[in-house]
Amino acid sequence: MGNRRRVAERRKTNPAVLGGMIAVVVGGAGFGLYALLGSGAAAENGPESASGQKKSVKTGPLSATEVTTAARDFLTAWQAGKVTEAAAATDDTTAALALLTGYTKDAHIKDVTLTSGTRAGAKVPFSVKATVSYKGTTKPLTYDSALTVVRREKDGKPLVQWHSAVVHPDLQDGDTLVTGASGTPPVKALDRDGGELTEKEYPSLGSVLDGLREKYGEKAGGKAGVELQVVRGKESKKAELSDKTLLELSEGTPGTVKTTLSPSMQAAAEKQVAAKEKASVVVLRPSTGEILAVANSSHGFNTAFQGSLAPGSTMKVITSSLLIEKDLASVNKEHPCPKYFTYGHWKFQNDDKFEIKGGTFKASFARSCNTAFISQAPELDDDSLTKQAQQVFGLSLNNWSVGVSTFDGAVPVQSQAQMAAELIGQGGVRMNPLNMASVSATVKTGTFRQPYLVSPDVDGRQLAKASRTMSAATLSQLRELMSYTAAYGTAAEAMSGVGGDVGAKTGSAEVDGQKKPNGWFTAYRDDLAAAGVVQSGGHGGDTAGPIVAALLKSGG
């Protein structure tokens, strides 16, 4: 019984406040963890009794007492600075011990008070009040977090399920908390009119401002201050997440970075996405590539710039340009739109299994007929769509230099059914609103201009270019397709009332595990182009369409 812990000695512990009840203060001869956990060694050493006989392992849902006890043990130990005990109350002792130790030693957080909220099943929310103290500078730190209790498989013991987010909700697994002189000076980001951009005024810009600081902090002439920061680990860096400041202990001197964002357009975009869950949108100026607005209803990850999602039928804009160039389709020529089309042993169908008999390619595009595009797969090479996306639309080359990190689209070379699926924005194709806004901008002007948030004049960087443009004849037909769809097709309801030179395309992308598809919409009006997605929203014309159309109207 070598790992049996004796707790008979009298000691004082500052208890955590748990669900309105004060946790047990461990003390008094013969009383302590024995009473909390059960009976002696058997409670600590797993499912074997003192006689050596195997005990049954408890399974099934956790009781309220098991959840509150496990949460109390963890929170009380953490609050008391007993990080070894706190880590032992989790299901990943090693990872928990490292982060909890760093919480004090590297983040310089002390005087921790943890107060739980109301338990919801196995989840226990709690608030944190603490002090960050570094080289004579002290500031209070407050935030909310939560933990979940699970049953350990080998012995049924309730333990806190370990994730770094338990310590702070902004932490991903592998991240750390550090207080010290910030490695990167702060920046003061300005809109195109010279006004300051702040996360308080524009909630969607938190990750964008972090990215601007990471890229331009050293170049903009600022001086680093002292901060409590989330320092990203390997996995977070792979996801292109930037380090994040949680608390500023002493101000640095910020440098200034001017962006292309329009204050009025950004405010309008924030308002539009706030009305939907998981909505993202980007607005561009096609003639220059300037980004006028970027907004996400979820603020932790910049889906608008870094998302990697199947774009559904909005991809048909690129596919149409390919088919027209290869003389496989023409706006006013008859084009097949059957209920079904089988290719590569996959049977493809249209939404609600509709068909268009004797219809034109324009009719198929406007109504978003899947089989009209899939039926042309046998005439294409495996790399045809990939080359079109790269050479004409500047996508899928991973070479955009926007001013912050972006995902530049992916159109991998695939074969058979997967290649066919890519023609309608499924399969391996991945995009985000920035990419699809750029697609509409390319159609509007006839030339790919890489979108950017910070002018290349600021740092002399080179913007990406496309290797060729569409022919005038192809471009004219593509504009006609998008204009007709905006007036009479699946985009008509959303685009009603949007005047000027307009074009649009809707999209819906099926995602495994979702009851509703992701809704997409991309469009242009005069010298504006925009695209948006509402995840799990449904059809693009009903979900993302009104967001995009409202922004095109506000910009006019």
Image (cartoon, rainbow, N blue to C red):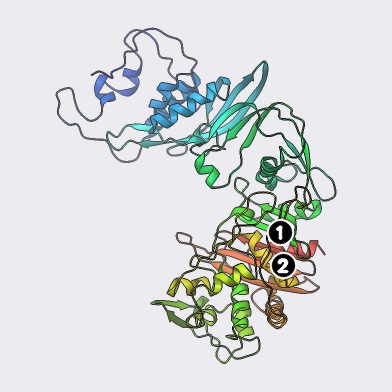
Between 415 and 351, the one nearer to me in the picture = 415
Residue lying at 74% horizontally and 30% vertically, measured from the top left? 223
> Where is residue 485 drawn, in percent x and y?
67, 77
Q: Please name whichever residue, 404 or 481, is drawn nearer the observer in this view of the structure.
A: 404
Residue contact at pointers 1 and 2, CB within 8 angstroms = yes
* Residue drawn at x 46%, y 77% as measured from the top left: 348
Name the residue carrying label 2.
Answer: 441
How far from the left and from the top, in percent, is residue 5? Answer: 31, 16
Label 1 crowd bin: few (<14), some (14–19), many (20+), radius 10 Å: many
Disc 1 from disc 2: Cα separation: 9 Å
Q: Which tag, 1 or 2, sits closer to the chain's start?
A: 2
Q: Quadrant of residue 171?
A: top right
Tag 2, which secondary structure? Answer: helix
Q: Does residue 279 show up?
A: yes
In this rendering, position of residue 34 left or right of residue 257 = left
Quadrant location, the C terminus: bottom right
Comparing 439 with 34, the one in front is 439
Which residue does the image show at 75% across and 52% down from the upper left?
456
User: To which residue does mark 1 refer?
Assistant: 451
